[in-house]
Amino acid sequence: MSGFLYTVMKIKMMKDRKTIAWIYQNSKTQLLSLLALILANALFAGCGVLFALAAKGVVDGAVAGERNTLIAQGLWLFAVIVLQLVLRIFCRNLEVRIQGRLEMGYKHKLLGKILQKDYTHTSGYHSGELMNRLTGDITVVSEGVTGIVPEFAGLLTKLLSALAVLCVFDPTFTLVFAVGGLVLFLTTKYFRKKLKYLHKNVQEKDGMLRSLMQELLESLIVIKIFGAEKNMETKAVERGQEHYQAKIRKNIVGILANSGFSFIFSIGYLYALVWSAFGLMAQTISFGTLTAILQLVGQVQAPFTGLSGLLPKTYGVIASAERLIELENLPDEADMNKEDINASAVYSAMQGIKLDDVSFRYDREPVLKHAGLTIEKGGFAVISGRSGIGKSTLIMLLLGIFAPTGGTIGIELNNGETMPVDKRTRKLFAYVPQNNLLLSGTIRENIAFIHANATDAEIMAAAEVSCAAEFIRTLPCGLDTVIGEKGLGLSQGQVQRLAISRAVLCGAPILLLDEATSALDEATEKRLLDNIKQMTDTTCIIISHKKAAFDLCSKEIRIENGRLKTVERSERLGYHTA
């Protein structure tokens, strides 16, 4: 049993070392600034000992009636106070700057990492939890890096310098005090596991609360329609209570530990006072020395208190860093093509898109089973099938968002080669999802989302294709009309047309429309699809249940029982297996 516990402890220590190494690697851009901050903190701490010695000189000069000594020591004390003020301002300003730069760097790097991760793994985290890690945990780590090491350097300097001076005054007293403080410090290691667990628990509960609140704010209309305000409020209160209880449990441990340390330090101060009083009574020390000893004891106590307080902060930083490392360690997206492609050149040489013996499944039952399909370049294909059968999943497979569990998906080229579909081939596609994903801002900004340098003429040309130009011209501010989050202020049909305009303007040769015309009336939908079909050298794949799409398509792709069945326009009365 003891061997097992030893192994577990060893693994945890190795994990902590790896985490600390990760923190160093991601913080070394600020190494020089951190060294300056560490040095400044050490100097500030050393000023505390100088203050005690200067105060001793002032008291001894006053007791001895030596006016010149009193004035000289008073001026020295004033100089120390001014130096402390300058160092405090410098340290605080530098600390804020370093912390801000580290936080920006962490966020930029982690966000970049998340964007490169396999979607099937990142989608397992609620967006609120990801935001919690991108904000809360990163703040904990950045504040810890700028606070813990410089503070530790200052505390260590204060401790060693104060003990050195105390040792000159009374070696025996100093030895007893130092041993007691060391024993107290070593006992704090037993809080390690508990403090890490409590910190992680608070962060996780905070993430759950943020996730719920985010969902509630995004679903206000649904909540109001179903009259679920009270139920949702109750659920939010329950999550808030769980977060509150987690914080209380963490704080109770901290309060008990700090209170215990404070009591022990008070006893230590009493010990120093009584010891010095006996020395004063025996005339072995001066009154100024007694004053200096009491001040130096406070200087020694502060580091021990600070060091014990640094431990929970350190474990909190390690716990938060582990949560960030967890995201970094998620699998990256497949990158079979290894380098960027020239979308125009690839499409020019493209014959079609081919799915060969493709299988795919989520955690539940299979979506596709040994499915085959070829979509010719320049075709207009409609994907059909009952709800939940896997139509949107097929689109995600074409985009390389999901990777097939079996078989291959590739771009067939004129030279007989096949380019595998992955993140590099997404340049070939313009995708309009079911929820359209418009951002808050102007209509111009939304349509030119990918093509930021597009002229108004180019934007309106794309809007003409999507039949959005007609309603844009009726708006008082035209392209400068500001819309709210998710297209607030526009009808669903208008939002869909703007999303299609954005896809058209991006210039990708293959359009993927996922129920992107569901809110349009039949006449508008027919005109829009006609416009797309008339676009030269464009391939369109659309998910739809509406008549206009089926009337215009050159191929229907039906998903049935995990298989893909296709019917050409000339064979509308029967199906054959692809």
Image (spheres, rainbow, N blue to C red):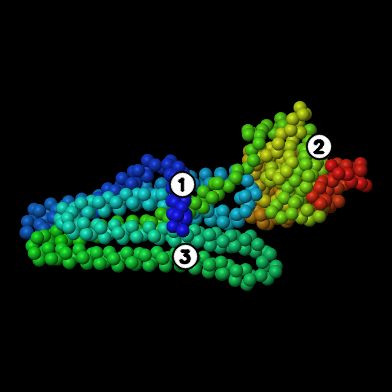
Query: What residue sits right under mark 3 in the picture?
Result: 247
Task: Where is residue 307? Give x, y as percent.
Answer: 33, 56
Amino acid type at mark 3 = Lys
Residue 504 appears in the picture as rendered = no
Upstream in the sequence, badge 2 or badge 1? 1
Residue 192, labelled with which disc?
Answer: none
Placement of 351 over or under 252, stated as above or below: above
Label count reads 3
Amino acid type at mark 1 = Lys
Q: Residue at x 76, y 43 (%)?
A: 358
Residue 288 appears in the picture as rendered = yes
**Mark toward the viewer: 1 or 3:** 1
Q: Nearer the viewer, residue 225 or 359?
A: 359
Upstream in the sequence, badge 1 or badge 3? 1
Residue 18, labelled with which disc?
Answer: 1
Q: Residues within 10 Å of mark 1 (few under 14, many from 20)?
A: some
Query: What residue sits right under mark 2 in the picture?
Result: 376
How far apart, in angstroms, are the residues tagged by discs 3 and 2?
A: 59 Å
**Mark toward the viewer: 3 or 2:** 3
Q: Nearer the viewer, residue 45 or 159?
A: 159
Residue 153 is left or right of residue 194, and the answer is left
